[in-house]
């Protein structure tokens, strides 16, 4: 069975089932990568195509069974709708192409500063993300550290030895609550915390769209998992092809340069 897939806005292939699985294991083909084979009505994300029941359909012109697309077809996949069009009827942006029908939406996204899903995202690496997290830590941590030290000093002067310091516990709980509100508000409203703004980073969906408050909330709690077991959830971003940490995998988000 021959498969075709989208690579940087261009149709690639054919590859057989084993080769496609190998590309997926190597990170070349992601769950959101568009793929097609004979019998499919349209291009679908790989994650959906590998688990769906496919209905018979006509063979698209550029995906002839057993043969690679030729240069004479001059066709490409639209990064917006995923359909195939003649290059003469498309506009090019970077390594991707956009069809005439999607052109108004595409231009509006450019006007709003959005990124294209077809290879237009520039993923932020481990160290720049660490720097953004460090800046956020300073913004939140320094004021609370001063409050915590003051409360601790007062407690040492007045508390009975061995008596639990409920005020200190309240301050620590307040820190976590404010940290949660800080993170969810800025990610949901602006797509970036102040630390990420300083480093010119932005949190987006896999398609490059802005995340909402719901996904920002889920990402905050998923990030708690990333901090467990020696912060391994953060460290995996250094080895991921799209620089995703554990909470990015869980919430299907990406951290990119604006």
Image (spheres, rainbow, N blue to C red):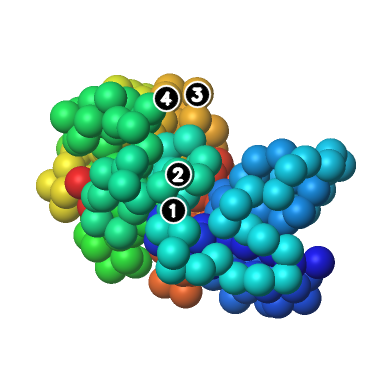
Residue 152 visible from this viewpoint: no
- Asked if labels 3 and 4 touch by Cβ distance under 8 angstroms, the answer is yes
Question: In front: mark 4 or mark 1?
Answer: 1
User: CA gap, disc 2 to disc 1?
Assistant: 6 Å
Q: Which residue is identified by label 2? A: 85
User: CA gap, disc 4 to disc 1?
Assistant: 31 Å
- Asked if labels 1 and 2 touch by Cβ distance under 8 angstroms, the answer is yes
Label 2 Cα neighbours within 10 Å, binned few <14 / some 14-19 / many ≥20: many
The residue lying at 66 percent from left, 71 percent from top is: 67
User: CA gap, disc 4 to disc 3?
Assistant: 5 Å
The residue lying at 31 percent from left, 47 percent from top is: 88
Mark 2 falls on what kind of element?
A: strand
Q: Earlier in the sequence, mark 3 or mark 2?
A: 2
In front: 221, or 137? Answer: 221
Question: In front: mark 2 or mark 4?
Answer: 2
Provide residue 83's location: percent of width, then percent of height. 52, 41
User: CA gap, disc 2 to disc 4?
Assistant: 32 Å
Q: Which residue is identified by label 3? A: 214
Label 4 Cα neighbours within 10 Å, binned few <14 / some 14-19 / many ≥20: some
User: CA gap, disc 1 to disc 3?
Assistant: 35 Å
Mark 1 falls on what kind of element?
A: strand
Provide residue 190's location: percent of width, then percent of height. 26, 28
Q: Quadrant of the N terminus?
A: bottom right
- Asked if labels 1 and 4 touch by Cβ distance under 8 angstroms, the answer is no
Q: Earlier in the sequence, mark 2 or mark 1?
A: 1
- Asked if labels 2 and 3 touch by Cβ distance under 8 angstroms, the answer is no
Label annotation for residue 76: 1
Q: Which residue is identified by label 4? A: 212
Provide residue 110's location: percent of width, then percent of height. 21, 35
Question: In front: mark 1 or mark 3?
Answer: 1
Mark 4 falls on what kind of element?
A: loop
């Amino acid at each position: 069975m021959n498969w075709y897939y989208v690579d940087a806005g261009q149709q690639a292939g054919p590859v057989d089932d084993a080769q496609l699985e190998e590309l997926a294991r190597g990170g070349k083909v992601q769950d959101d990568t568009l793929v097609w084979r004979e019998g499919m009505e349209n291009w679908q994300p790989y994650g959906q195509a590998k688990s769906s029941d496919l209905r018979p359909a006509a063979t698209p012109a550029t995906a002839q069974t057993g043969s690679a697309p030729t240069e004479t077809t001059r066709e490409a996949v639209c990064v917006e709708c995923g359909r195939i069009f003649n290059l003469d009827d498309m506009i090019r942006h970077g390594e991707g192409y956009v069809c005439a029908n999607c052109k108004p939406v595409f231009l509006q996204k450019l006007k709003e500063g959005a990124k294209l899903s077809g290879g237009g995202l520039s993923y932020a690496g481990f160290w720049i993300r660490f720097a953004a997290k460090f800046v956020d830590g300073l913004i939140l941590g320094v004021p609370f550290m001063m409050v915590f030290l003051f409360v601790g000093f007062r407690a040492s002067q007045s508390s009975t030895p061995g008596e639990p310091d409920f005020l200190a516990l309240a301050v620590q709980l307040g820190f976590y609550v404010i940290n949660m509100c800080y993170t969810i508000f800025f990610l949901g409203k602006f797509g970036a915390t102040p630390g990420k703004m300083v480093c010119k980073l932005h949190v987006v969906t896999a398609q490059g769209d802005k995340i909402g408050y719901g996904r920002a909330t889920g990402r905050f709690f998923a990030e708690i998992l990333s901090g467990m077991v020696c912060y391994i959830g953060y460290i995996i971003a250094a080895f991921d092809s799209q620089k995703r940490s554990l909470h990015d995998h869980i919430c299907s988000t990406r951290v990119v340069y604006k």
